Image (tube, rainbow, N blue to C red):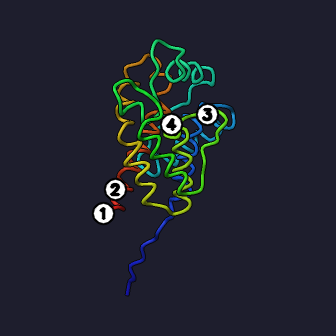
């Protein structure tokens, strides 16, 4: 007689690792400690998405220059990384999405006190908070933050990024992030049903 044994594998630490890893990237942390984690991030994303994608990470200076040109206003136009900017014609920060995210942090007893003073709905702040929610098992709040937040505006940001010259330099990171985000959106949506 055979018994049907299904193994359950807890993906939580791996998913949380990716939220933290990409959060660091979007906050501008591209140093050697971040670079060392790249292969792990790619391996975990491949495993979660059941795909095998091999992409090399550009050198640190190439990433830094492309990041500055795209996100810090060093280039001809800046691509915003905060949800509020995608919700109004003027691309203004600190809108309704920022307030809602701030309130969500407060419900969990957290305050955005990062040294770089990014708005509460900036992806570099949201993703580490998503890792925290995931580790704490707060799936409904995670769903609100990711499916009801990042997933609403990231496709627009990615489409704009793909039109920029710097896309080629950051494509390995951005496409890996988008694959992970798509995985999360599907998982969180399925779990909410």
Of the two numbered discs 1 and 4 in the rendering, the one whose residue sits closer to the viewer: 4
Mark 4 crowdedness (10 Å alpha carbons): few <14, some 14-19, many ≥20: many
Which of the two discs, 2 and 3, sits closer to the camera?
3
Where's the C terminus, which quadrant? bottom left
Q: Which residue is mark 3?
A: 117
Mark positioned earlier in the residue sequence (4 or 3): 3
x and y, in percent, of residue 183 in the image: 39, 49
Q: Are marks 4 and 3 in contact (CB under 8 Å)?
A: no
Give neighbour class at mark 3: few <14, some 14-19, many 20+ (Cα, 10 Å): few
Residue shown at the point (62%, 20%) measured from the top left:
61
- The disc label shown at residue 129, or none: none
Question: Residue 193: which disc?
Answer: 1
In the picture, measured across the screen, residue 163 lies left or right of residue 64, that is left
- Looking at the image, is mark 1 or mark 4 earlier in the sequence? 4
| Foreground of the two, 46 or 97 | 97
Residue pushed farthest left? Answer: 193
User: What is the CA distance from the residue labelled 2 to the residue labelled 3?
Assistant: 31 Å
Q: Choose between 48 and 132: the one closer to the eye.
A: 132
Q: Determine the CA span between mark 1 and mark 4.
A: 28 Å
Point out the tag, 1 or 3, that comes first from the N-terminus.
3
Number of other residues with Cα within 10 Å of mark 1, as a class: few under 14, some 14 to 19, many 20 or more: few
- Is residue 133 at all visible to an observer of this figure? yes
Gap between marks 4 and 3 measured at Cα = 10 Å
For the residues labelled 2 and 1, the Cα–Cα distance comes to 7 Å
Residue, far bottom: 1
Quarter of the image with the N terminus in it: bottom left
Residue with the mark numbered 2: 189
Q: State the separation of the CA atoms marked 1 and 3.
A: 36 Å
- Label 4 belongs to which residue? 122
């Amino acid at each position: 007689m055979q018994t049907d044994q299904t193994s359950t594998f807890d993906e939580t630490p791996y998913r949380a690792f990716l939220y933290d890893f990409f959060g660091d990237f979007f906050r501008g942390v591209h140093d050697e400690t971040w670079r060392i984690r790249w292969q792990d991030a790619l391996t975990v994303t491949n495993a979660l998405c059941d795909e095998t994608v091999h992409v090399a990470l550009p050198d640190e200076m190439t990433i830094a220059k492309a990041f500055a040109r795209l996100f810090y206003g060093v280039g001809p136009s800046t691509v915003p990384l905060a949800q509020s900017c995608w919700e109004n014609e003027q691309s203004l920060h600190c809108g309704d999405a920022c307030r809602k995210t701030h309130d969500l942090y407060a419900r969990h007893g957290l305050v955005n006190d990062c040294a770089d003073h990014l708005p509460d709905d900036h992806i570099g702040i949201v993703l580490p908070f998503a890792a925290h929610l995931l580790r704490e098992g707060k799936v409904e709040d995670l769903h609100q933050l990711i499916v009801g937040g990042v997933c609403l505006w990231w496709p627009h940001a990615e489409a704009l990024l793909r039109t920029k010259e710097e896309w080629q330099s950051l494509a390995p990171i951005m496409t890996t992030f988008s694959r992970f985000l798509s995985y999360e959106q599907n998982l969180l949506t399925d779990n909410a049903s």
